[in-house]
Image: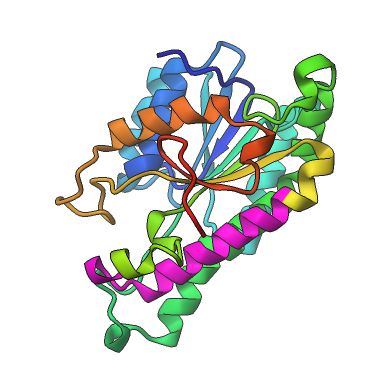
């Protein structure tokens, strides 16, 4: 499979799970002109060892950026660092992958407090909101650089925001997914992320910036658990097969890892 993505790519939550696999496959499959900014809270910590190994394996293609998506100052510093590096080139693809779940699954109502709700919302919604807001000038710059012919068509190769969401954010699907895990903070935060996706899609369409939410599947990660049917490799392979095909019709939508629309 050839992933037709290129340019400057910024990915959050990359020290493990889906984020780490995104960096790995993007490094393997994107063009020589691509550069990946891989973000995590503690780049020098033991939890980021696999990410550091990837950066060593692909010298000059991966830059590790310190980022805590729950901290506005950290977000501002990361955006400033990347802005200085990419200058006039612009940012082609922002993947908001970082997310937390509190309290531990099943996160039943009786176990969930106000702090859980606020902490999860801060990371899963406010973080992507601030990142996108601060990166907007660079996303606009990338969109403007490709403004001829097919350039009027939205795409992940040109200028796009991908918000990693979930099937369990769907209100219509809630009756069938709720028994598996109640997860009040996580579900409601991802439903809010979907609305953020929808709002930004409307706001940014005049700039030809694509904004789409994608459900990666039920994946075998620290959050997904060992019983999950999908590996991170298969999930990311599927998502990276879908992303290059996204266009105007997909902006503001919630899709699954195969590109099918999920009802709100």
Asked if residue 15 can be seen in this view, the reply is no
Q: Is residue 171 above or below residue 65?
A: below
Q: Is residue 192 magenta?
A: yes
Q: Is residue 157 above or below residue 258?
A: above
- Give the x, y percent position of residue 261: 49, 45
Asked if residue 2 can be seen in this view, the reply is yes
Q: Is residue 207 magenta?
A: no
Q: Main secondary structure of the magenta part?
A: helix
Say whether residue 216 is left or right of residue 119: left
Outermost residue toward the left in this view: 227
Q: Which residues are magenta?
A: 178-201
**Residue at 60% across / 20% down in the picture?**
6
- Give the x, y percent position of residue 157: 64, 24
Quarter of the image for residue 230 reads: top left
Q: Is residue 158 above or below residue 121?
A: above
**Residue at 74% across / 26% down in the picture?**
153
Looking at the picture, tell me which residue is in the foreground, 15 or 225: 225
Looking at the picture, tell me which residue is in the foreground, 117 or 43: 117
Looking at the picture, tell me which residue is in the foreground, 7 or 187: 187
**Residue at 38% across / 33% down in the picture?**
236
Say whether residue 1 is left or right of residue 194: left
Say whether residue 110 is left or right of residue 229: right
**Residue at 64% across / 59% down in the picture?**
196
């Amino acid at each position: 499979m050839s992933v037709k993505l290129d340019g400057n790519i910024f990915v959050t939550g990359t020290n493990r799970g889906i984020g780490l696999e995104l960096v790995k496959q993007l490094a393997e499959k994107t063009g020589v002109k691509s550069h990946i900014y891989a973000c995590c809270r503690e780049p020098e910590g033991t939890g980021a060892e696999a990410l550091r190994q990837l950066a060593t394996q692909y010298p000059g293609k991966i830059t590790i950026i310190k980022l805590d998506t729950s901290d506005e100052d950290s977000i501002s510093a990361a955006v400033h660092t990347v802005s200085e590096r990419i200058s006039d080139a612009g940012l082609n693809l922002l993947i908001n992958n970082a997310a937390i779940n509190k309290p531990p699954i099943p996160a039943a109502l009786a176990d969930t407090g106000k702090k859980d709700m606020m902490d999860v919302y801060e990371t899963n919604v406010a973080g992507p909101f601030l990142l996108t807001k601060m990166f907007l000038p660079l996303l606009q710059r990338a969109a403007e650089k490709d403004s001829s012919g097919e350039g009027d068509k939205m795409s992940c190769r040109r200028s796009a925001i991908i918000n990693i969401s979930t099937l369990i954010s769907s209100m219509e699907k809630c009756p069938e997914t709720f028994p598996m895990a109640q997860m009040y903070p996580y579900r409601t935060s991802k439903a809010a992320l979907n609305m953020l996706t929808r709002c930004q899609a409307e706001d940014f369409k005049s700039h030809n910036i694509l904004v789409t939410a994608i459900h990666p599947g039920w994946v075998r990660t620290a959050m997904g658990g060992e019983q999950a049917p999908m590996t991170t490799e298969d999930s990311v392979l599927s998502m990276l097969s879908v992303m290059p095909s996204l266009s105007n019709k997909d902006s503001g939508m919630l899709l699954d890892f195969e590109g099918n629309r999920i009802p709100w």
